[in-house]
Amino acid sequence: MSSAFRDPKSLPEWFELDYYERPRPLRRRRRILGWGLLFATTAVVGLAVWWGNRRIYQGGPVSEAHRMFNNDCGSCHTQAFETAMRLLPTHPAARSVPDEACQQCHRGAPHHEQQVARPGSEQCADCHAEHLGRPVLARVPDRHCSGCHEDLKRKDGKPSEFVNVADFRRHPEFTWFREQTRRPDPGTIKFNHAVHLDEKGVFMPDSRQLAALWEGKSGGEPTRLKRVLNCRDCHEPDDAGMAMKPISFEQHCKQCHGLPIRLGDVANAPGLQAAIRRFEGQPVSHPRPGQSQAVVRAELRDRFTSFVQEHPQVLGQGPGARERPFPGWDRSLASTRQEHEWVNDRATNAWRVLLHSPGGCVYCHQLVADPGKPDVEPTVLPARINQRDFPRLGGTSSRWLPHGQFGHDSHRMLDCTECHAARTSRLTSDVLLPGIESCQKCHNPSVGARSDCVECHRYHDRAQEREFVGRRTVAECLGSK
Amino acid sequence: MIIDSTHKRWIALTLLLAFLSGGAFAWLYATTPGGLTGGSFVGLWYGIAGSVLMIFAGALSGLRRVPSWWWIGSRQAWLRGHIWLGLLSVLLILCHSGFRVGGPLTLALWIVLGLVIVTGILGLVLQQVLPRQITTSIPCEAPYEQIPHLCNRMRLYGDGLIGKVFKNEGKDEAMSIMLSQMGQGAKLQLQGFYYDEVRPFLAEDYDRKSKMANAALADAAFTRLLALPGLATVKQHVEELRLLCDERRLLIQQERLHGWLHGWLLVHIPLSVALLVLTVAHVVTALYY
């Protein structure tokens, strides 16, 4: 108190000694603001409760698919105060959203019968955590997968048939290329990709020219028809744009590799030119998957039998020698001995030409003969171009990667040969699937294409999905029940 | 509160707790698939710890109501705890949230908590600087609530001084009439100056544009006044008026510094109340759903 006008003697004059009992402005204002904010905040919270707006309490936005009942927390949070139970160490997995709530709309099939459930990953909400701003709940972080797949265990204690994997950067090579499980393409069709993708094109004669070439006749210079093929001429994507449709002879091979049939020396019989042209113009049908060469022999026999019965002139008989059925009536006639011998001779010859001649069955198919039975005709091996064995998994699949999802449509901007080395492949045994390194070029965090587990793999085994009977109403789904 | 060596133990304890809790959270976050959320077992306990610290910090204001409870510790200790554990609560709440902002209610909580912490830190910084500045720059520091009363007293004193100036008129009878007339004119000027400039400035509510509010301008005005012939006999009174104005300026500076020193509490305390209300709403709804 260093003032010229104040001294201890005059203190009672200069100061009010009871000043500390007076209200202080700053304190008064603080009190008013404090109470005011208390009431205002309480009022805001109360109003929100009264209006029924539950969204303000959310810890974060829900995923896109759940937005329609965003304001009805009870749609999923069916267990009240269950979160509080999680405070107890005995209830770490307590969930206010039990699996039954999810299963009102989702199937959630099991993953694997030998799966060992890891603590903290036994329920739907353990992996599919809402309110974290994820637009798609199915896209779970990799750690949910690698938590088990870093060190796989089976319920029965046996070693797992799968290789451990932590993330895509350290993903093991695909089964087809891994040292322990490497094996060639199981297909038995002799196919040379390099020839079919030749930049100069492939030779595509019609069936007559091809037949003439088989007999060593030139028939004049065949018109050389060349066409440059590309992958899509044979490999068509399925409707989903994921895998490729199976290769079929009828659709993809027949145009170039037809199976012609010749009648032989009856070509000069009078009055039969048109019939001969009709007969020889229709190639033999290729067996369908699951059928054997016996089907072809049967067709040859049928066709020759029909021809000779319709045209007895080939046996030197008159046109009316045999009873002819009414048109449209399918009344098979028993063969005479002469017809039978003629058919036998022609069919056997035609089958021999078809089977063994260049451009015939052996051009593409492998034959296997029984060494103990030299007189028995060799068998054509099944093609197996759409059938792959997975011994470790104990099954067969038409897919190269039965546990991975690959969408060709997503990669449509790429040339097929960027991943499939078809232009240089000459052997059927070549596995033209790209190695995982090819995928990792783009699918890595530094480049940008997604590389999380769920990009290619699915947790829920769709094959084990049970029938789902929906029971909710539209109002319930909209959260306005 | 001045941050001095008595805070060392608190700082060390806070840093240790921060390191342990942060490290534990980081390890648990890295080893838990999908990370930790506020509703997980770990997240919930971090939230509880952070809330307990916030409630402890808020309990400081209730201490004055229980002065006889000596066993709860000294006010100094509580204030130190308020500062350091209050700062620690921010880390615990960050861990509880998983470093996410969350929805509308949690966003509001973050904003309010942030303002509370920022104003608290601001207040703490001001408390390191301003008290010392008040002591050194305002030698005539007075209790803040007494300043209006002091202003009143100074005005009365000033009125008395002017009265004394005109009471001295009798002593001028021996002077010449001319000198007497010059002295009368100067005193009238002095009177006019006092009532126009000085007295309004000495009031509790003064004009901020007043010349007396500026030391240089006031000094110049008083110097000009003292130069007037006829005021030599009352020079002492004029000097006292000058000192009154000087003291008033110091009291104005004290008011300003006092406002800075305590004004942040007008934001800090009410927002703390709002923070506690929102926290209760958050806790109830989070544990319910």
Image (cartoon, coloured by chain):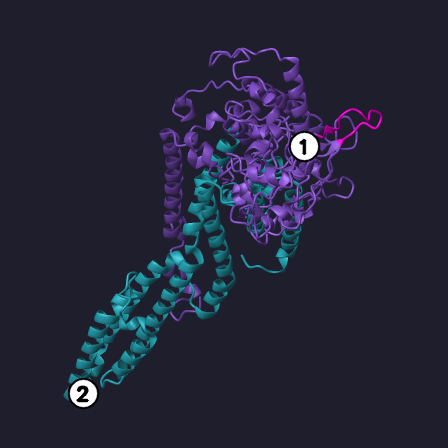
Q: Residues within 10 Å of mark 2 (few under 14, many from 20)?
A: some
- Asked if residue A169 shows in the view, the reply is yes
Q: Is residue A77 left or right of residue A41?
A: right
Quadrant of image for the N terminus of chain A: bottom left
Q: Is residue B83 left or right of residue A341?
A: left
Q: Quadrant of residue A375?
A: top right
Residue type (three-letter) at the residue carrying disc 1: Val
The chain assigned the colour purple in the figure is A
Pick the front one: A215 or A254: A215
Q: Residue at x 28, y 61 (%)?
A: B205
Query: Which residue carries the number 1 mark?
Result: A353
- Asked if residue A394 shows in the view, the reply is no
**x and y percentages locating residue B180 in the rendered image:** 17, 84
Query: Which residue carries the number 2 mark?
Result: B179
**x and y percentages locating residue B270 in the rendered image:** 42, 46
- Same chain check for tags 2 and 1: no
Residue type (three-letter) at the residue carrying disc 2: Leu
Q: CA distance from mark 2 to mark 1?
A: 155 Å
Local SS, label 1? helix
Question: What's the magenta region?
Answer: A368-381
The answer to if A373 sits in the magenta stretch is yes
Q: Residue at x 38, y 29 (%)?
A: A52
The chain assigned the colour cyan in the figure is B
Question: Chain under label 2?
Answer: B
Q: Nearer the viewer, mark 2 or mark 1?
A: 1
